[in-house]
Image (cartoon, rainbow, N blue to C red):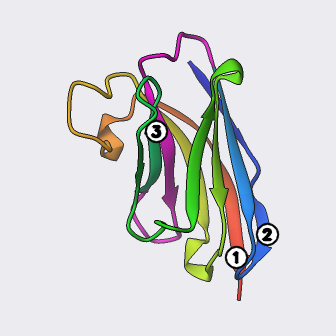
Amino acid sequence: VQLQASGGGLAQAGGSLRLSCAASGRAFSNVGMGWFRQAPGKEREFVAGIRWSYGDTYYADSVKGRFTISRDNAKNTVYLQMNSLKPEDTAVYYCAADASPYTRRWPPNTNEIDYWGQGTLVTVSS
């Protein structure tokens, strides 16, 4: 499985960015996909996720109401629309896939992720 992330960059506080994660290599009807982020000196943390078959979405409290995760079935792509960005959103964002999202509680911890994409840097200036 390959996850190709794109869309990071520089934004001002209050601005918006959209991240994309294109998945390939297997059928994705039964996976959960999402985004984690890691700021300098901090642990990687869950940001948002979606379980492909159900379409149910999950968000970290810190991004609820500002970030929206969505999927395009035809393109096997997950998007993270980030609005009202804050400097504390600055981090490397990682696309992730969980091959067993219906066998345990969701969202997953980092050690429950089966596939990781390369990170994409998001920098929010104040």
Q: Position of residue 12 (x, y in %)?
A: 77, 80
Between 67 and 86, the residue placed more toward the observer is: 67
What residue is pinned by disc 2?
A: 10
* Residue 29 sits inside the magenta stretch: yes
Marker disc for residue 124: 1
> Label 2, label 1: how many angstroms apart (C-alpha)?
6 Å
What amino acid type is highlighted by mark number 1?
A: Val
* Highlighted magenta segment, given as a residue range: 24-45
Q: Earlier in the sequence, mark 2 or mark 1?
A: 2
Q: Residue at x 57, y 61 (%)?
A: 67
Vertical side of 47 occupied by 53: above or below = above
What amino acid type is highlighted by mark number 2?
A: Leu
Q: Helix, strand, or loop for circle 2?
A: strand
Image quadrant containing the N terminus: top right
Q: Position of residue 49 (x, y in %)?
A: 45, 44
Q: Residue at x 68, y 51 (%)?
A: 120
Q: Nearer the viewer, mark 3 or mark 2?
A: 3
